[in-house]
Image (spheres, rainbow, N blue to C red):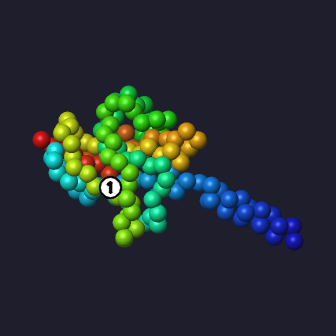
């Protein structure tokens, strides 16, 4: 009987954690629909498997080697606010009928290089978090994925 009660308490704790944990924080990492693009080209970035749009999320386009950021040992970073420079606000993500969270944008006139998406997520932490889809300095693979190469 004590074992069943203990199991119920553990199950309740896990269920409560799942309800409290933000779905955005758990799995926001967009992929681009193409490997490279020039200024003026329309590009989409997306992630499948969403039933709704997470609240308080804004998508940015950022260089993979975002200046002024010190990544952790694994290469990721979380900032307490969006950087004031070197990022481009793309807007809020949309939900497609096929349950893809996505954003479509026209590549602005920016320096050539490797870029990824990043997110300002107000609901991910008490005062919000800013984090990227790809690790800091992630290499371009030449295939559609988390890094978009912008060319002239």
Find residue 124 and report its horizontal and vertical position in percent: 53, 47
Mark 1 residue crowding within 10 angstroms, few (<14) / some (14–19) / many (20+): many
Residue farthest to the top, as pictured: 68
Query: Going by the image, does 67 lie left or right of 106?
Result: right
**Which residue: 48% across, 56% down?**
54
Find residue 152 and report its horizontal and vertical position in percent: 12, 41
Find residue 48 and report its horizontal and vertical position in percent: 39, 64
Above or below, 61 against 17 in this view is above
Above or below, 124 against 33 in this view is above
**Residue where numbered disc 1 is placed:** 103
Q: Is residue 35 visible?
A: no
Find residue 90 and report its horizontal and vertical position in percent: 32, 46
Secondary element at image label 1: strand
Above or below, 103 against 71 in this view is below
Total number of numbered discs in the rendering: 1
Residue farthest to the left, as pictured: 152
Q: Is residue 87 visible?
A: yes
Above or below, 18 against 147 in this view is below
Query: Going by the image, does 37 lie left or right of 84?
Result: left
**Which residue: 42% across, 40% down?**
75
Q: Nearer the viewer, residue 130 or 127?
A: 127
| Residue 118 quadrant | top left
**Which residue: 43% across, 66% down?**
49
**Which residue: 77% across, 66% down?**
7
Quadrant location of the N terminus? bottom right
């Amino acid at each position: 009987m004590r074992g069943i009660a203990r199991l119920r308490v553990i199950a309740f704790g896990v269920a409560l954690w799942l309800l409290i944990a933000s779905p955005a924080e758990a799995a926001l990492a967009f992929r681009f629909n193409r490997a490279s693009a020039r200024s003026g080209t329309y590009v989409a970035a997306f992630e499948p498997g969403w039933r709704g749009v997470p609240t308080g999320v804004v998508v940015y386009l950022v260089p993979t080697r975002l200046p002024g950021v010190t990544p952790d040992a694994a290469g990721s970073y979380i900032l307490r606010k969006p950087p004031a420079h070197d990022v481009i606000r793309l807007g809020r993500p949309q939900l497609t009928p096929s349950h893809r969270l996505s954003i479509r944008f026209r590549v602005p006139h920016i320096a050539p290089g490797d870029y990824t998406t990043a997110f300002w997520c107000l609901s991910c932490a008490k005062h919000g978090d800013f984090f990227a889809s790809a690790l800091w300095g992630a290499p371009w693979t030449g295939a559609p994925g988390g890094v978009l190469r912008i060319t002239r």
